[in-house]
Image (cartoon, rainbow, N blue to C red):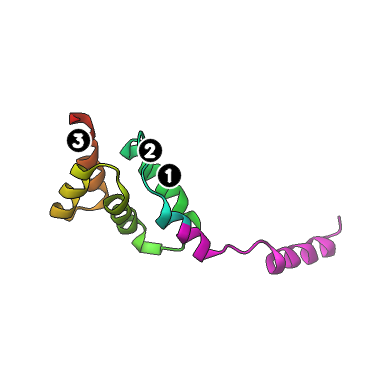
Amino acid sequence: MSLMYMRTFMKLETHFGDKVNVVMERHKFFKRCQAQDESIVNYVAVLRGLTKFCEFGNLTDSLIRDQIVCCTNNVKIQEKLLIKNPSLTEAIEIAKGIELTQ
């Protein structure tokens, strides 16, 4: 391939390449609830993966935390997180602790 062809191809790829539908990606994120037998660690990993194309920026961790609060399948975890107002890291540790005791 010639250099000119490669440059033209790259410009076309940039212009016509797949565009991410941010609304769809955010919809997937906000609709994802914790599965019945899913650990909090796995749930957070899935949520983090879903944020890849959501363009949340510096809100990513707080939105993951909020999603845990809204969509966990464990009422005790939800109640504790609502009372504590933790960071994402603290929320994960609280949830793991509750999972271990149950």
- Is the C-beta separation of discs 2 and 3 under 8 Å? no
**Picture disc at residue 42:** 2
Quadrant of the image occupied by residue 6: bottom right
Residue lying farthest to the top in this orientation: 101
36 horizontally vs 84: left or right: right
1 horizontally vs 52: left or right: right
**Picture disc at residue 46:** 1
| Above or below 50: residue 43 | above
| Above or below 76: residue 57 | below
Report the residue at 23% width, 53% height from top. Answer: 87
Report the residue at 14% width, 52% height from top. Answer: 84
Mark 3 vs 1, N-terminal side:
1
Q: Position of residue 4 (x, y in %)?
A: 83, 65
Q: Nearer the viewer, residue 102 or 11?
A: 102
Residue kind at label 1, given as amino acid type: Val
On whether residue 15 falls in the magenta region, the answer is yes
The residue tagged 3 is 97
